[in-house]
């Protein structure tokens, strides 16, 4: 796979994985790291940007939701966001929970800049750790 196609695939996989759609951008990232499709830092950056934009899409969805019915999981996430503010979005990478946090951040009209920055940091750290573990593992087995 050429580098452009690899980066395009990673971006869209990362974007879609961060929306309410199911996906596994981690598998795509690891695959591209193992095949040396591009620089690891470039792969991490592309995955982080795609995943962050997917999280922003969830914030927009949340801003469009007029009213959320009380539910145990939603109430817990809402209380967490209200208590910790945009810093709670550092955990937007956590499967399912992260999607809910982003939607609720939009619904609660949390500040855009702080939300996007925290989402980007959280998602980048996740991809960075995954890349380091993958590359160290391959160095140890090679």
Image: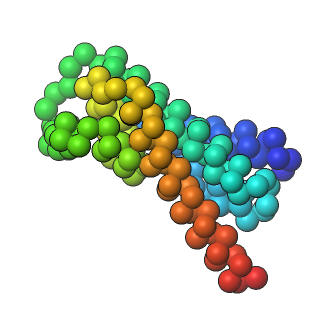
Looking at the picture, tell me which residue is in the foreground, 112 or 59: 112
Residue 63 rendering spot, x and y as whole percentages = 33, 20
Residue 81 rendering spot, x and y as whole percentages = 24, 39
The quadrant where residue 65 appears: top left
Residue furthest toward the right? 2
Q: Quadrant of the C terminus?
A: bottom right
Looking at the picture, tell me which residue is in the foreground, 78 or 117: 117
Picture residue at 32% right of the left edge, 37% below the top: 86
The quadrant where residue 82 appears: top left
The quadrant where residue 14 appears: top right
Residue furthest toward the bottom? 141
Can the viewer see residue 80 in this picture? yes
**Lateral position of residue 110 relative to residue 93, left or right:** left
**Lateral position of residue 94 relative to residue 71, left or right:** right
**Lateral position of residue 27 relative to residue 86, left or right:** right
Looking at the picture, tell me which residue is in the foreground, 78 or 67: 78
**Lateral position of residue 110 relative to residue 33, left or right:** left
User: What's the image's color scheme?
Assistant: rainbow
Picture residue at 73% right of the left edge, 65% below the top: 34
Picture residue at 44% right of the left edge, 41% below the top: 119
């Amino acid at each position: 796979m050429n580098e452009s196609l690899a980066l395009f695939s990673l971006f869209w996989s990362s974007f879609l994985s961060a929306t309410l759609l199911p996906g596994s951008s981690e598998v795509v990232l690891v695959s591209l790291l193992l095949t040396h499709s591009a620089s690891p830092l470039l792969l991490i950056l592309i995955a982080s940007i795609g995943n962050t934009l997917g999280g922003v899409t969830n914030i927009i969805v949340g801003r469009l939701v007029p009213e959320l019915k009380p539910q145990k999981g939603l109430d817990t996430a809402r209380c967490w966001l209200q208590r910790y503010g945009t810093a709670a979005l550092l955990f937007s990478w956590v499967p399912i929970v992260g999607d809910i946090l982003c939607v609720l951040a939009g619904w609660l009209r949390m500040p855009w800049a702080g939300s996007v920055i925290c989402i980007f940091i959280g998602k980048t750290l996740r991809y960075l750790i995954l890349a380091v573990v993958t590359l160290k593992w391959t160095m140890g087995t090679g």
